[in-house]
């Protein structure tokens, strides 16, 4: 996660706002989509990804499809702030508690 933060996050801003997706470095202009559109990003369901849950500070390895299924079953009251990326870190999907996803490089 340190490598992820070094690449994408303005650490000074992070201290002020608390969530990494609110602290993306200015050169990144993420595309904002409704959470339901995560299935339409063209990422194969069997792609191995990392899933970082910022609220509980846990990093998981899973398939993209498993993460999509998890996100789809969340109830309205379940807040999530999480990040999906693969080993290249060339793309990131931030799943926010505001029922939106932020997509960089996807």
Image: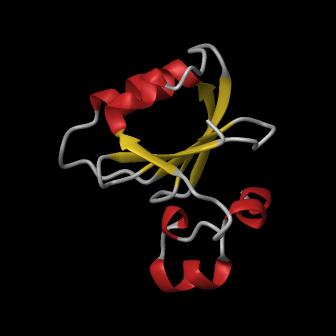
- Compared to residue 11, the image places residue 8 above or below, namely above
- How is this picture coloured? secondary structure
Q: Residue at x 64, y 60 (%)?
A: 28
- Compared to residue 32, the image places residue 46 above or below, namely above
Q: Residue at x 52, y 26 (%)?
A: 41
Q: Residue at x 55, y 58 (%)?
A: 57
Q: Is 8 left or right of 97, judged from the image as shown?
A: right
Q: Is 2 left or right of 67, judged from the image as shown?
A: right
**Residue 10 appears in which quarter of the rendering?**
bottom right
Please name whichever residue, 106 or 14, is drawn nearer the observer in this view of the structure.
106
Tell me the quadrant of the picture where the N terminus can be found: bottom right
The spot of residue 82 in percent (x, y) is: 49, 49
The spot of residue 3 in percent (x, y) is: 80, 58
- Compared to residue 27, the image places residue 76 above or below, namely above
Please name whichever residue, 2 or 93, is drawn nearer the observer in this view of the structure.
93
The spot of residue 13 in percent (x, y) is: 57, 82
Tell me the quadrant of the picture where the C terminus can be found: top right
Q: Residue at x 68, y 65 (%)?
A: 27
The spot of residue 56 in percent (x, y) is: 48, 57
Please name whichever residue, 56 or 95, is drawn nearer the observer in this view of the structure.
95
């Amino acid at each position: 996660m340190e490598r992820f933060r070094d690449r994408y996050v303005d650490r000074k801003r992070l201290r002020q706002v608390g969530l990494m997706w609110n602290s993306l470095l200015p050169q990144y202009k993420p595309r904002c989509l409704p959470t339901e559109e995560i299935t339409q990003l063209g990422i194969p369901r069997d792609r191995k990804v990392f899933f970082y849950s910022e609220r509980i500070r846990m990093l998981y390895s899973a398939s993209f499809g498993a993460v999509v299924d998890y996100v789809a079953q969340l109830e309205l009251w379940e807040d999530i702030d999480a990040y999906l990326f693969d080993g290249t870190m060339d793309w990131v999907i931030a799943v926010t508690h505001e029922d939106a996803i932020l997509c960089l490089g996807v």
